[in-house]
Image (tube, rainbow, N blue to C red):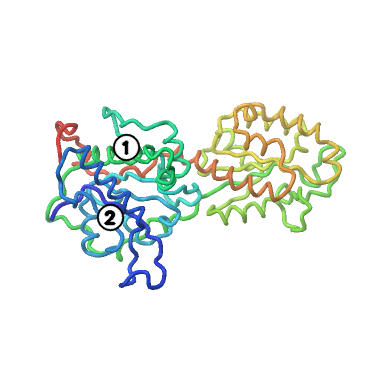
């Protein structure tokens, strides 16, 4: 039996009633065409006339003996990434099986459609793959890279004005596959590590919640800035309610509920509790969102504490500033804006427009919800960029760590 060089893992679209004769899902036509395109590029780049078993597309035979053997033996695992991929139990089992093999395999993700950070239960780099040095990457147009990140391969296929963008990205993925195959050790014919995917855990079910810290910097009714009325405040900073929208629930609690809907496991903290993490005195274990009441900046001590926070490089912390909807706040708008600009000069000068707008004031709960969803995901992505991605390679073995002589030229 031929060992497949690469295994394409895919979560099929659930079939409509009567769509297939045996009830098993078929691969989407567009995904099958991508598989054929990738197959052709791998053959061309490797200079081989290998049979079709050079690749394996997992769809109709999901969990079957042929599919399990291909997963066991393949050198490269190519997951076709969509939102559905991370909720598909077979995809989760395949991921776990590949990443826990004794013989190392290589993960080369192919982004099919955009997936927010919060919908990814495992760390995975979704940028277009790049071959390791000294191999020179096949050229890809700069706009193609942007479009790939924005819409994935599915979006590139729909671009009739620049069909070459899709071809360039598929060729780059194929180049990474070929390089990984050339460096991979051949499996032993008698090696068997798993024979039934039903016995393998779902890699995505075990870690489906991302932690998220929510810090609140606001006065309480017993520690208000001079002249500030207490109508928006409670016994602690977490009781602050800037918006009069009828919910009667503190903003921090509502934000935590929104975070849970996005796939986060939120933890609400006061600024006093979060400050050691922000100032580097304690290692962060999650991305953060800081919710800031500009009224507290009338306290010179609080203003200096926020300036110290602003001086730190914390891309994994997003700042949102709700502007209360009471008349006193509207009358003090210019002064509060001045204080915000004095407290956050570095962030305001270096952030994207959406981040600057969120820092300078959000005046209603609907906009706050929308900005939170965007900026919480941005903080999560920045946090994941700080930690080593374990999804690019699987657990190494001693034999896999030693490079083969001449592996730059050797053909598999």
| Residue at 64% across, 51% down | 255
Sequence order check: which comes first, mark 2 or mark 1?
2
State left or right for residue 32 relative to residue 380: left
Name the residue: 67% across, 44% down. 216
Q: Quarter-wise, where is residue 377 in the image?
A: top right
Where the C terminus falls, by quadrant?
top left
| Mark 2 nearby-residue class (10 Å; few <14, some 14–19, many ≥20) | many
According to the image, label 1 marks what residue? 172
Work out whether residue 102 or residue 178 is closer to the camera in this orientation and state it.
178
Residue 206, quarter of the rendered image: bottom left
* Residue 90 relative to residue 249: left or right: left
| Residue displayed at 62% across by 56% down | 257
Query: For mark 2, what is the residue?
Result: 57
Q: Residue 202's spot in the image, x, y percent?
A: 37, 59
Q: What is the quadrant of the N terminus in the image?
A: bottom left
At x 81%, y 41%, the residue is 224
CA gap, disc 2 to disc 1?
A: 19 Å
Above or below: residue 135 compared with residue 121 = above
Q: Residue 331, located in which quarter of the rendered image?
A: top right
């Amino acid at each position: 039996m031929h060992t497949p060089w690469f295994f394409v893992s895919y979560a099929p679209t659930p079939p409509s009633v009567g769509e297939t004769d045996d009830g098993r899902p078929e691969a989407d036509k567009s995904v099958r065409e991508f598989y054929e395109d990738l197959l052709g590029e791998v053959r061309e780049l490797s200079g081989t006339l290998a049979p079709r078993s050079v690749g394996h597309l997992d769809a109709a035979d999901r969990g079957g003996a042929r599919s399990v053997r291909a997963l066991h033996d393949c050198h490269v695992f190519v997951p076709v990434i969509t939102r559905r991929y991370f909720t598909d139990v077979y995809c989760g089992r395949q991921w776990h099986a590949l990443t826990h093999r004794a013989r190392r395999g290589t993960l080369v993700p192919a982004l099919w459609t955009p997936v927010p950070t919060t919908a990814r239960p495992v760390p995975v780099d979704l940028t277009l793959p790049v071959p390791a040095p000294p191999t020179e990457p096949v050229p890809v147009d700069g706009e193609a890279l942007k479009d790939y990140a924005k819409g994935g391969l599915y979006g590139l296929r729909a671009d009739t004005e620049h069909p070459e963008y899709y071809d360039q990205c598929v060729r780059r993925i194929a180049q990474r596959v070929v390089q990984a195959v050339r460096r991979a050790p051949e499996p032993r014919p008698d090696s068997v590590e798993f024979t039934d995917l039903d016995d393998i855990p779902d890699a995505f079910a075990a870690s489906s919640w991302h932690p998220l810290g929510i810090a609140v910097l606001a006065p309480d009714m017993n520690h208000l800035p001079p002249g500030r009325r207490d109508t928006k405040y409670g016994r602690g900073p977490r009781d602050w309610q800037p918006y009069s929208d009828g919910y009667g629930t503190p903003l921090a609690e509502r934000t935590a509920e929104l975070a849970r809907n996005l796939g986060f496991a939120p933890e609400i903290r006061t600024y006093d509790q979060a400050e050691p993490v922000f100032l580097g005195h304690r290692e962060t274990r999650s991305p953060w969102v800081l919710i800031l009441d500009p009224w507290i900046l009338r306290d010179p001590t609080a203003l200096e504490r926020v300036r110290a926070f602003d001086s730190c490089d914390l891309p994994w912390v997003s700042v949102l500033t709700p502007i209360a909807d009471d008349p006193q706040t509207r009358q003090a708008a210019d002064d509060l804006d001045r204080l915000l600009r004095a407290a956050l000069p570095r962030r305001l000068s270096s952030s994207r427009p959406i981040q600057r707008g969120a820092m300078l004031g959000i005046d209603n709960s609907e906009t706050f919800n929308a900005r939170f969803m965007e900026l919480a995901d941005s903080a999560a992505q920045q946090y994941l960029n700080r930690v080593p991605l374990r999804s690019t390679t699987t657990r190494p073995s001693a034999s896999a760590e030693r490079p083969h002589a001449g592996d730059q030229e050797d053909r598999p």
